[in-house]
Image (cartoon, grey):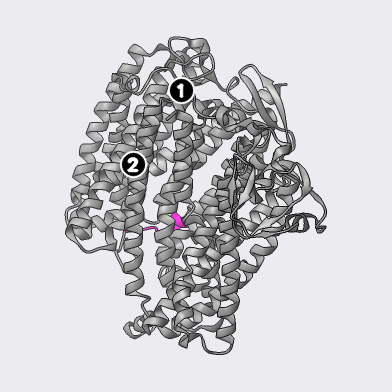
Amino acid sequence: MDTLFLSRIQFALTIGFHYIFPPINIGLSLILVVMEGLYLKTGKTVYHDMARFWVKIFALCFSIGVATGIVMEFEFGTNWAEYSRFVGDVFGSALASEGIFAFFLESGFLAVLLFGWDKVGRKTHFLSTVLVSFGAHFSAIWIIVANSWMQTPAGYVLAQTDHGMRAQITDFWAMVFNPSSIDRLSHVIMGAWQAGAWFVLSVSAYYLLKNKHTDLAKRAIQIALVVALVASLGQLVTGHASAIGVSRNQPAKLAAFEGHYASQAPADMYLFGWVNERDEKVQFGLRLPRSLSLLVSGNPNQPVTGLRAFSPTDRPPVNIVFQAYHIMVAVGMGLIGLALWTGYLLWRLRLEKSVWTLRLLVASVLGPQIGNQFGWISAEVGRQPWIVQNMLRTRDAFSKTLEPLQVFVSLILFGLIYLLLFVLFIYLLDQKIRQGPKEGILSVKRAEL
Amino acid sequence: MDWVVGLNYLWFLLVGVLFTGYAVLDGFDLGAGALHLFAKTDTERRVVLNAIGPVWDGNEVWLVSGGGALFAAFPRVYATVFSGFYLAFILLLFSLIFRAVAIEFRSKQDGKRWRSFWDASFSVSSTSSALLIGVAVGNIVLGIPLDAQGNYTGGFLGLLRPYPLLVGATTVALFAMHGGLYLLLKTEGDLHERLRRLTLWATGVFVFFYAATTVATLVSIPHMTDFLRRAPALGLVAILNLLAVLNIPVQLGRRKDLKAFFSSALAIVALMSLFGFGMFPNLVYSWPQVQNSLTFLNAASSPKTLWIMTIVALIGMPLVVSYTTFVYWTFRGKVKVDEHSY
C-alpha cells in the first residue's frame, strides 16, 4: 500500500464520517427557525418545548461536526501538499471565506441558541436561530463552490512560476459561479434539508408509536413533513439539472453513471445492473432503452458520449460510480414516495393509526444519510482519475514527502477514534430521545415567579 | 508594482493577526482546560467548562480561518508545514477532536467514571494542543531543513529538538496562566481563591520559561534578532512585552483580575509581534539551506488572489468582531451553572 492509496482511503473515511453531521445541522437549523418562528407568532409553548429539545440534538451533532471538520481544513495540507501548492491560489480563497463568513457566524450565535434561553429575549433568540441557520447554509455555499471548481474549473489561468505550474484566479465571480456551482449547491442543500427533516420525522414517529409526547410529535411532523416534501421533490429538479450539467461538463462521469460505453450512440438507463468493466457492458440489469438520451437532451435518439471516447487512463472506476449513483437515485425516489404517502395519511387524519408507516418513518432517518454518502461517492469517484477535472491528476496531487507508514498509522487512529465517536454519538442520541422533550417548562418557570 | 508587494506585506501581517487572535482567545480556553483537573468537585468542574462554554468554539474558528488564510495567501507554506509536520499535526487534530467532544459529552451522563474520563480527556488534550502548537512554532523559529521544492526533509524526530520543546513548555505555561486569569473573571468563592493561588504559580512558571526562551533565542538564534539592528525602534515591543508580563503578578496581587487578564493578552500580542518581526521576510525558515526558505514573496499567491482576500477580510472582519463582541457581552459576568449548561 502506497502513500497515495492510503491518503485516498483516509480522505474518504474522514470526509464521509464528517459528512454525516453538517447536513443534519443545516436541515435542523431550518426546522428550528420554523419552530421558534411559530412559537413567536402563536405563543404556543409546545413549539418552544420542541425547539429546546431539537436544539440539544443540534448541539450534539454540531460538536462532532466541528471536531471532524477541523480535520478537513488541514488535511489538504497534510496529505495533499502538491494539490495545495497547485490550487491554493484559487481553492484557498473559497475555504478561507467559509471560515470568515460562515463559521464565526454559526459558532457565535449557536452559543446564544444553547445557553441564551434565559439571557436574551424571545426575539433575540429567534434572530440568533436565523443567523445560525444562515451560517450553516453559508458554509455549504463556500465548500460546494470550492468542490465545484474541482469538477468544472473556471475563472483561472495556468501559470508557470519559479516553483512549478499552478492555477491562478483571473475572475473571482467566474470561479464562484463556475458551470456546476448552482446545480450542485442546490442539490446538496436539498439533501441537507432532507437529512434534518427525516431525522425529525423519525424521532416524532417513534414518539407516536410509543404514545409519548403525542401533541408535540404531531406538530413536529407537520413542520418536518413540509420540509421533507419540498426537499425530496426539489431533489428531483436539482438532480435533473445536475445530470444535464454533468453530461455537458463531465461526460466521462455521466457515462459511468449508466455504464454507457459506445462512444457515440443513444444511451440507455438502468434501474439496476452490474458493470463488467473488462467486457465493457452492463450485466444483470433492468434496462430502460434510450432513456439517458431522453433525460439529458429530451430526445431519445440523441447520441451520448460514451466511455470508449476516453482513453482507459482517463476513465473513472465505472462499477463503483454506477452502483453509488443508482443507490442514491433509488433512495431519492423512495423518499419522494414516502413523503407523498405520509402527507396523504396526514391529510386523511390516519397517520397516527398507521403503524407500518410510522415504523417506516422511524427508519427513514437513514434514507438521506445513504443518499448523501452515495451521492458524494458518485460525484467524487466519477471525477477520477482527476483531482481537478482535466487539469491535475489525483496521483500527482498527494504529499510526496510522506512515508506510507505515517499515513497508515494516522488512518488506523482515525478509524478507531471515529468508531468510538460514532458509538458514543448513537448512545447519547438514543438516551436523549428516550428522555424526550421536557414539556411545560415555561409554565413551571412562571409558577416559580 | 509597489502596491503589489504591499499586498504581500499586508497578508504577512493579516495571517499574523489571525493566529494572534487565535493565541489570545483559544489560548485562554486551552489554558482553562490545562487547569481543569485542579477544580475538585463536580460543580467546580462544570463551572470551569461553562466559563468557556459559550466561547471556545468561536475561538477555535480563528485557527480554522488562519489555516484557510494561509492556504489562500501562502499556499506553499500551508503545504510545506502541514505535510512536513505530519504526525505532529495529526496528534494536534486528535487532541482538538477529543477536546471538542469531551466538552460536549462530559456532563451528559451522571456516572463517575464517565465524567472522570472526559475530565481527563479535556485536560490532557488541552495541554497537548498547547504543547504541540508551541513545538511547531519553536521549529519554525529555529528553522527546518527544506529542499528546493520547499518540502520538509527532517522526519518526525527531527521536530523534537531542545529549543522547540522549550517553546512548547513555554506555550503550555503561558496558556495555563492566561486561562487561569480568565477563570478568575468567571468564578467566585472557594474555587476562585484556589484558582488565584494556582494562577500565581502558573505565572511564576511562565516567567521562568519566558526568561529561558528569551535567553536561548538571543544566544543561539541570531536570525530572530536581526530586526533589532535594522529597526531598533521595534525593540520597544520587546520592552512592552516585558512590562506586560511583569504587570500580571502586580495586578494579581491587587486583585485587579481584569487588568491582569488584559496584561496577559497584551503579552501574547507582543510575543506574536516579536515572532513576526524576527521571522520576516520568511514564513518558514530553512536551515541549513537558507535559500530554500519560504518568504512572504516566493510563497505567496498571485496579486489578484491577495486582493480578493483583502476584500473578503475588509467585509468579514468587522462582522466577526461585532458578533464576537455580542457573544462575550451576552455571557459576561460570573458563571452560574443551570439546566442549559454543559
Chain at tag 2:
B
The x and y percentages for residue A314 are: 65, 34
The numbered mark at residue A32 is none
From the viewer's side, name the closer residue of A182 and B286.
A182
Pointer 1: what residue?
Answer: A401
Residue A268 seen in render: yes
The residues colored magenta run B326-334
In this view, B266 is above or below A362: above
The x and y percentages for residue B148 are: 53, 13
The kind of residue tagged 1 is: Thr
In this view, B211 is above or below A102: above
Q: Are marks 2 and 1 on the same chain?
A: no
The x and y percentages for residue A341 are: 58, 79
3D distance between C-alphas at marks 2 and 1: 24 Å
Indicate the quadrant where residue B4 lies. top right
Pointer 2: what residue?
Answer: B95
Say what secondary structure mark 2 lies in: helix
Q: Quadrant of the C terminus of chain A?
A: bottom left
Report the number of discs. Answer: 2
From the viewer's side, name the closer residue of A281 and B163.
A281
Residue occupying the point 54% across, 90% down? A349
The crowding category of the residue bearing disc 2, from other C-alpha atoms within 10 Å (few below 14, some 14 to 19, many at least 20), is many
